[in-house]
């Protein structure tokens, strides 16, 4: 049991793990992020085409754009169930079937019903991928490169969005664009055949020999996997013995980090990010910038990819709290500027400039960090349930925001909508300064202690239930 507290240096002192197989595994599953990123970016170039051909009216377009979030709301909890039944690899392979079915409906659907069904199914794929892929990457990565490999998922999502923007800039047929956007899913499906199941899942199913074999393949033949294997097995034993009651969940040291995480997920989406990304082409088209709206969207997409890549080293240098605070403040300013571009005539340069700043600020802070905090602040015993709740909050809020985006613009004009999002970002900035803790460089025990969690005298004890939880083991 003592191996659970071993540091990264101790785990690596006997030999250095090989990285090639890990890189391949992480890249293979991160293609899932690129696959659903194309779905997120698809509506930006496609919606003007649907509108021009009369395939969808304004109300149908609004629902077609936003409904993917509702599908993701279902996909997250579904994946939480499937990963413990089908395994991580099995869950990803089953999600591929959904993605291909979704693109087939979107590509060949000729009226609202099949198109909407395709977007719902695409959303289920998105929600499943958001949970399963980061889980798998975290479980197969060695400690020395886990951070870098974990960040690859968010980066691939932004590349997928840019992929849709680029092809949408010169393809004027929604069927062709949908089929091209389905290509990353096909590549994802092929790569999944060559990866191994997570060693954590093997251990959970009592398949210790398979877990050792997989760890050895991932870490290289000269690496001693026994310390890591014992750590995984002992952690699983703790999870198998732990019981968490509703009373435990209401304890301040558990409830506080859960509420903070839910709040950051809420603020992430009420910044208007998905509403903007899903409707980027329409925004530029109505702003009369003098630049082709698809070209403008591509510029913003490139900025998003670069900023997401820059965020990886910044997160462990600047810290989570300062990046979140700065991100929220800069988003507020850029949204004020974007609203001003619609309020005052003659500022054709301002929409693109303000959206570049807005997307860059989001990508280095409020894009990745709420997901990082979700993994850092939840104690082991409640992580699965709390993570599912966080995902529900994120995609549920995203659905509401994207659904009301067009009606809001009709009710309070474009400038009023962006200024409303700016006001929320101001509140968010104050929240980050006053409430969000800094977790950079802190162990899970130190983070728990910050919220008043019990001190662990023995690392075999579950941290959430105190004496009651220990007695229940």
Image: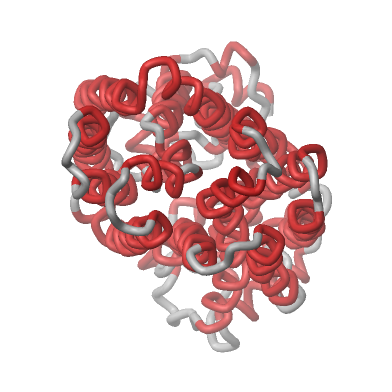
Residue 13 can be seen in this image: yes
| Image location of residue 355, percent across then percent down | 28, 46
Query: Residue at image x 69%, y 71%?
Result: 212
Image coloring type? secondary structure
Residue 241 can be seen in this image: no
| Image location of residue 112, percent across then percent down | 77, 38
Using the image, determine if residue 413 lies above or below residue 208: above
Using the image, determine if residue 418 lies above or below residue 176: above
| Residue 108 figure quarter | bottom right
Please state if 133 lies on the left or on the right of 334 as rendered.
Answer: right
Quadrant holding the C terminus = top right
Q: Nearer the viewer, residue 120 or 142?
A: 120
| Image location of residue 238, percent across then percent down | 63, 41
Using the image, determine if residue 263 lies above or below residue 237: above
Using the image, determine if residue 153 lies above or below residue 68: below
Please state if 141 lies on the left or on the right of 123 as rendered.
Answer: left
Please state if 288 lies on the left or on the right of 371 as rendered.
Answer: left
Query: Residue at image x 21%, y 50%?
Result: 353
Query: Residue at image x 60%, y 39%?
Result: 65
Please state if 151 lies on the left or on the right of 470 as rendered.
Answer: left
Query: Residue at image x 57%, y 65%?
Result: 30
**Which residue is farthest bottom?**
222
Q: Nearer the viewer, residue 418 or 325?
A: 418
Q: Nearer the viewer, residue 249 or 405?
A: 405
Q: How many marks?
A: 0
Q: Nearer the viewer, residue 443 or 266?
A: 266
| Image location of residue 12, percent across then percent down | 42, 73
């Amino acid at each position: 049991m003592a191996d659970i507290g071993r540091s990264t240096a101790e785990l690596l002192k006997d030999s250095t793990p090989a990285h090639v197989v890990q890189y391949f595994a992480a890249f293979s599953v991160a293609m899932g992020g690129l696959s659903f990123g194309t779905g997120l970016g698809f509506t930006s170039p496609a919606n003007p085409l649907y509108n021009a051909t009369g395939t969808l009216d304004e109300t149908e377009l609004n629902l077609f754009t936003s409904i993917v979030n509702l599908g993701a709301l279902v996909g997250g909890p579904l994946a939480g169930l499937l990963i413990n039944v089908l395994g991580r690899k099995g869950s990803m392979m089953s999600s591929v079937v959904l993605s291909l079915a979704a693109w087939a409906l979107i590509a060949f659907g000729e009226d609202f019903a099949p198109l909407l069904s395709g977007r719902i199914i695409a959303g289920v794929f998105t929600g499943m991928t958001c949970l399963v892929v980061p889980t798998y990457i975290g479980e197969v990565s060695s400690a020395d490169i886990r951070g870098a490999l974990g960040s690859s998922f968010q980066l691939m999502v932004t590349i997928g969005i840019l992929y849709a923007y680029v092809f949408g800039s010169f393809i004027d047929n929604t069927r062709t664009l949908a089929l091209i956007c389905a290509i990353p899913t096909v590549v994802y499906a092929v790569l999944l055949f060559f990866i191994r199941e997570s060693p954590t899942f093997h251990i959970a199913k009592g398949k210790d020999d398979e877990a050792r074999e997989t760890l050895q393949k991932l870490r290289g033949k000269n690496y001693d996997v026994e310390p890591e294997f014992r750590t995984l097995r002992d952690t699983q034993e703790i999870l198998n013995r732990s019981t968490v009651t509703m009373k435990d969940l209401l304890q301040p040291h558990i409830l506080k980090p859960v509420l903070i995480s839910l709040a950051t997920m809420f603020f992430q989406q009420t910044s208007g990010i998905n509403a903007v990304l899903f409707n980027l082409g329409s925004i530029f088209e109505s702003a009369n910038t003098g630049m082709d709206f698809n070209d403008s969207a591509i510029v913003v997409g490139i900025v998003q990819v670069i900023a997401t890549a820059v965020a990886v080293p910044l997160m462990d240098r600047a810290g989570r709290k300062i990046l979140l605070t700065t991100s929220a403040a800069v988003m507020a300013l850029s949204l004020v500027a974007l609203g001003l571009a619609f309020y005052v005539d003659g500022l054709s340069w301002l929409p693109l400039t303000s959206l570049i700043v807005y997307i860059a600020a989001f990508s280095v802070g409020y894009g990745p960090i709420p997901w990082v905090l979700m993994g850092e602040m939840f104690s082991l015993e409640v992580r699965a349930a709390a993570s599912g709740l966080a995902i529900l909050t994120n995609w549920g809020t995203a659905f509401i925001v994207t659904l009301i985006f067009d009606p809001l613009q009709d009710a309070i004009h474009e400038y009023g909508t962006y200024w409303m999002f700016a006001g929320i970002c101001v509140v968010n900035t104050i929240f980050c300064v006053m409430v969000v803790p800094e977790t950079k460089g802190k162990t899970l025990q130190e983070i728990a202690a910050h919220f008043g969690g019990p001190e662990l005298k023995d690392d075999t004890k579950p941290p959430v239930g105190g004496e009651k939880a220990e007695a229940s083991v």
